[in-house]
Image (spheres, helix red, strand yellow):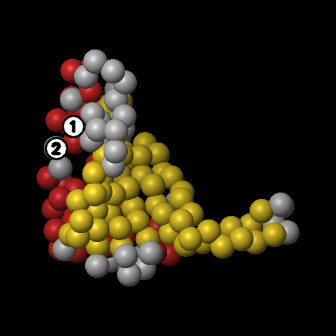
Amino acid sequence: MYKWTVCDPLEKDVIEKGVIEKNKILETFVNYPWKDELNKRPSFDGEPFFSPTLEFIDTKNCQAIAFSVVDDFNGLSFYLFYKRPQKVKKWFGLVSKYDPEYVSDLLDQDFNSAKEILEQFLNQKFQELENKF
């Protein structure tokens, strides 16, 4: 089962969208109005709360991937955040700790790269994702 959330630039809280069918996730990402969401920010009097963001959560595998967009000089740039359970080493590798929500980021990705990473997530190619992040 998958769930999803949205961060709207003008809303202070994350918007829980509920359950989404796996076969609708890629379509949702591709058809999301990224540019329109970015364009909301200049019309807002205060500081925006978020960059436009979509998060997809794989509840079965306890993993999630989020796509946040910024406008750079070359067009849209995606920041990706991959959350999963992970054993993390601390204190120069002397101590290990299990982190159920370990997050890694991958910055400055174009639309096609972000889409490819989402496809890997949906196809449960977690080792490939681990190598990228």
Residue 16 lies left or right of residue 102; in this view the side is left
Tell me the element at label 2.
Answer: loop
Q: Would you say residue 120 is visible in this rendering?
A: no
Amino acid type for the residue under numbered disc 2:
Pro
Residue 70's place in the image compared with 2, above or below, is: above
Q: Callout 2: 10 Å neighbours few (<14), some, many (20+)?
A: few
Residue placed most toward the observer, 45 or 95: 45
Q: Quadrant of residue 17?
A: bottom left
- Residue shown at 14% from the left, 52% from the top: 31
x, y percentage for residue 87? 66, 73
x, y percentage for residue 75? 28, 33
Count of marks overlaid on the render: 2
- Residue shown at 28% from the left, 51% from the top: 15
x, y percentage for residue 114? 34, 54
Residue 14's place in the image compared with 88, above or below, is: above
Tell me the element at label 1.
Answer: helix
- Residue shown at 34% from the left, 29% from the top: 48
Residue at the spot of label 1: 37
Q: Quadrant of residue 44?
A: top left
Residue at the spot of label 2: 33
Q: Quadrant of residue 19?
A: bottom left
